[in-house]
Amino acid sequence: MSERLSDVVVRIQSVQQLSAVIAAMRGISAARSREARGQLDGVRAYAETIAVAIGDALEHLPSGPPVAAAPAEDRHAIVALCAEQGFAGTFNERVFDAVEERMKRTPGTTRLLLVGDRGLMAAGERRFDVSWSAAMIAHVGQATSLANRIVEELYRALDQDEVRSVSIVHAFPGASATVDVRERVLIPFDYARFPIDARSQRPLVTLPPDILLARLAEEYIFAELCEAVIQSFAAENEARMRAMIAAKSNVEHTLDDLVARSRRLRQEEITNEILELSSTETDAN
């Protein structure tokens, strides 16, 4: 069946509408990524304040800084931050690759706590047994709420001895065109990374040093989770933005091809009309 000009015109209109949707998605993703990046400095300043307080609290311990225990080989929990929405390229696949690598290094039981509805859908393809899940944030203002939910689940599992160590796997924004993923250990808490600042005048504390230190460590883990959530949110939107740029290029090529075909078909229609008119005039003579 020969191609009709009207069909090509309809396809051109459809592709133009798709191009507008892609442009809108790219703009939204770019705006969300910028907003998330803008919040990172504040979260890091908050974490740095707690880090200084931990250093001060360590100086109050008569026995010196606690020695961090080695990560448990059994009952390990992995918090995986995945994508909430689609059109993010290989975002979830890269996070899942890192999760699988972490599982290989943990011969015992591993619990997977997964964030992101799109990641939860894709987890079945990897045959992951997800023990807890939550939706990823829709805007950066929800980061603290999500971090609180994760903290509550982790400490519930720790209190019931379901989990003995915790690590988090998440993507972070970067200049590269690929999705960069990192892993960090949250529990056991490593006090050695906080330098002790021997001040001439120690800060006044009203809590026993060990209780103060434990509460500060919990607060620092919360800050780390907030930072990871925001970084993952920014990285997801950057991945979607790159996917939309590639889709925009493909749409433009398709549109150029359709426009060229519409011109050719229009020219053929004009030629056929001229030939038909010429034939009619000849028959009349």
Image (cartoon, rainbow, N blue to C red):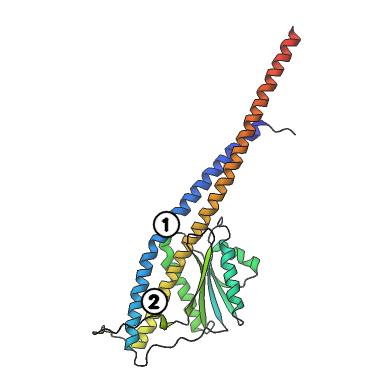
Q: SS for tag 2?
A: helix
* Residue 226 point in image, percent of width and height: 43, 69
Marks 1/2 in contact by CB < 8 Å: the verdict is no
Question: Which of the two discs, 1 and 2, sits closer to the camera?
Answer: 1
Q: SS for tag 1?
A: helix
- From this viewpoint, is residue 19 visible? yes
Q: Quadrant of residue 201?
A: bottom left
- As drawn, 280 above or below 110: above
User: Residue at horizontal 49%, vertical 47%?
Assistant: 24
Q: Identify the amino acid type marked 1.
A: Arg
Relative horizontal placement of residue 116, taking residue 46 as reference (left or right): right
Q: Quadrant of residue 210?
A: bottom left
- Separation of disc 1 and disc 2 at Cα? 26 Å
* Quadrant holding the N terminus: top right
Total label count?
2
Q: Identify the amino acid type marked 2.
A: Glu
Q: Residues within 10 Å of mark 2 (few under 14, many from 20)?
A: some
Q: Which residue is mark 2?
A: 219
Residue at the left extreme of this rendering: 201
* Residue 25 point in image, percent of width and height: 50, 50
Q: Quadrant of residue 260?
A: top right
Residue at the bottom extreme of this rendering: 63
Which one is earlier in the sequence, the residue at label 1 or at label 2? 1
Q: Which residue is mark 1?
A: 34
Residue at the front extreme of this rendering: 176
Relative horizontal placement of residue 196, taking residue 168 as reference (left or right): left
Relative horizontal placement of residue 214, taking residue 10 as reference (left or right): left
User: Residue at horizontal 57%, vertical 42%?
Assistant: 252
User: Residue at horizontal 58%, vertical 37%?
Assistant: 13
* Residue 193 point in image, percent of width and height: 41, 80
Residue at the top extreme of this rendering: 285
